[in-house]
Image: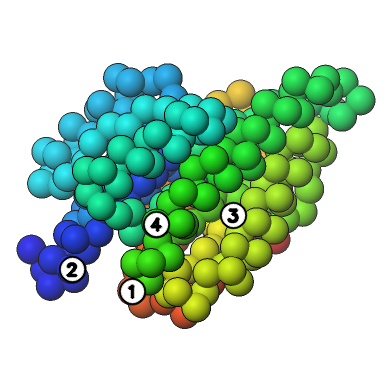
Amino acid sequence: MSEKNLKNAFQIALVTGASRGIGEETAIALARTGRFVYLNYRSQKDRAQTVLDQIIQSGGKGKLLPFDVTDKKAAEAAVQAILAEKGKIDILVNNAGIRDDMLMVRMKKENWQTVLDTNLTGFFNVTRLVVKNMLPKRFGRIVNISSTSGQTGQAGQVNYSASKAGLIGATRALAREVAKRNITVNAVAPGFIETEMMKDQPVEDIARTIPAGRLGKPQEVAAAVLFLCSDQAGYVTGQVLGVNGGLI
Ligand code: NDP
């Protein structure tokens, strides 16, 4: 094991929505660099188990941790379970997210609420207790997966854009609250990334609108998250790192 990975081997990470897509690649990247990774998911146990198997086969360490991020009690119980097992959480990646696109005139309250509950309140439900534990330890890395849609607004995504813009505001505010304790809080704002979230989208048309001429890969988002979790990124906080092929 390299010197860097040896140090990371004492770090505990939690990645929400780690059963596929960006969360999957982030969990794999964190485990590959030595961290013990808790993989959260909501419903797809088989997919999450496949990710964990891959991590373990590559010599990494981790554990499944199913809960729904919209359920405050369940989220807090899961965080408590990690603290009981490991005594700390060094890295939290708030990645679980959904979209439910439609024009605002057709949007019902439930379409609004479910997206806000998952993408924004989910962040609150998981992060509050994690931060409380990080404060006395005087170390922490929190990365929130926002979106270009939260930076620019996107037609058909009033609910999603609001949730992802809210996450950026929360990132910047929390970063200021905890900076003195050596805890960094940053957001990564992916553009269009090749995951199941994009499966019903006109991918070729979208690619033409991106300066890089292609969609991004979940591994490219994971690489940005990995940097923000590193020791080298200790002076980077309250920032939004776009991974969008030059879209904005
Ligand atoms: P996917 O749809 O591929 O995966 C979503 C993940 O989130 C799954 O692991 C899913 O778990 C989990 N999840 C959803 N709802 C909940 C919940 N209530 N509680 C716990 N876990 C939940 O998404 P992506 O990988 O594409 O996206 C990951 C993040 O990146 C999201 O926040 C998304 O908004 C953001 N993003 C994605 C972009 C893209 O182009 N793909 C662009 C910009 C941002 P399960 O399957 O078990 O239910």
Secondary structure of residue under mark 2: helix
Vertical comparison of 224 with 193: above or below: below
Which residue is nearer to you in this view: 233 or 113? Answer: 113
The residue positioned farthest toward the right in the image shown: 105
Look at the image and name its color scheme.
rainbow
Left or right: 208 in relation to 199: right
Q: Where is residue 45 shown, x and y percent of the image?
A: 33, 21
Query: Disc 1 vs disc 2: Cβ atoms closer than 8 Å?
Result: yes
- Give the amino acid type for the residue marked by disc 3 in the picture: Ala
The span from disc 1 to disc 4 (Cα, nearest Å) is 19 Å
Of labels 1 and 4, earlier in sequence is 4
SS assignment at label 4? helix
Closer to the camera: disc 4 or disc 2? 4
Please rate how many residues cluster around mark 1, counting C-alpha atoms within 10 Å: few if below 14, some from 14 to 19, many from 20: few
Residue 213 at x, y percent in the picture:
59, 51
Residue drawn at the location 54% of the way across and 40% of the way down:
125
| 6 horizontally vs 20: left or right | left
* Distance Cα–Cα, label 1 vs label 3: 21 Å
Q: Mark 2 points at which residue?
A: 7
Front tag of 1 and 3: 1
Q: Mark 1 points at which residue?
A: 231
Q: Which of pointers 4 and 2 lies earlier in the amino acid sequence?
A: 2
Of callouts 2 and 3, the N-terminal one: 2
